Amino acid sequence: MLFLISKSANKEQSELIRLAKLGKQFEEFRIAEIIARNCTAWDTSKDKREGLLPEVYYSDICVYEKITGEKYNFSKACKKFHIGEY
């Protein structure tokens, strides 16, 4: 009986760990999406003096690469995060 309780507890703990990992992946995806939206907005902005500062744009690109593992590319980001008409 003790073995069954222990096995059940391990299964529940494994499920909690799995859900925590999924939550972290979703959170990273959302952060990458927000950064991609900021970067694509900058790329399409006609007046660079208003809105996002250039230093924020360049640091966002670095964070985007760190989170996604790929360099920021306007077209790829639009497709990946369904930005605009892509």
Image: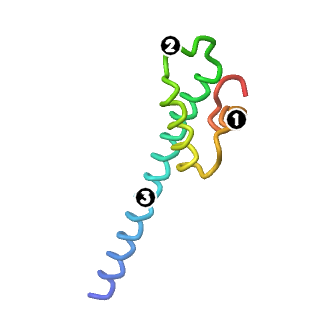
**Amino acid under disc 1:** Lys
**Amino acid under disc 3:** Leu
**Residue at (58% x, 23% y) in the render:** 42
Horizontal placement of 80 versus 11: left or right? right
Secondary structure of the residue carrying tag 1 is helix
Secondary structure of the residue carrying tag 3 is helix
**Amino acid under disc 2:** Glu
Q: How many marks?
A: 3
Horizontal placement of 16 versus 85: left or right? left
**Residue at (31% x, 88% y) in the render:** 3
| Above-or-below relation of 22 to 51 | below
- Read off the residue under disc 2: 50
Within-10-Å neighbours for mark 1: few <14, some 14–19, many 20+: few
Where is residue 71, by image quadrant?
Answer: top right
Spatial CA distance of label 1 from label 3 is: 27 Å
| Above-or-below relation of 41 to 24 | above
Can you tell which of label 2 and label 1 is closer to the viewer?
A: 2
Residue 1 horizontal/vertical position (percent): 28, 88
Q: Nearer the viewer, residue 69 or 53?
A: 53
For residue 36, which numbered disc appears in the image? none
Spatial CA distance of label 3 from label 2 is: 41 Å
- Read off the residue under disc 3: 19
Residue 38 horizontal/vertical position (percent): 54, 28
Horizontal placement of 13 versus 18: left or right? left
Q: Of the two numbered discs 1 and 3 on the same chain, state the one appearing first in sequence.
A: 3
Residue 25 horizontal/vertical position (percent): 49, 52
Secondary structure of the residue carrying tag 2 is loop
Within-10-Å neighbours for mark 3: few <14, some 14–19, many 20+: few
Q: Of the two numbered discs 2 and 1 on the same chain, state the one appearing first in sequence.
A: 2
- Read off the residue under disc 1: 79
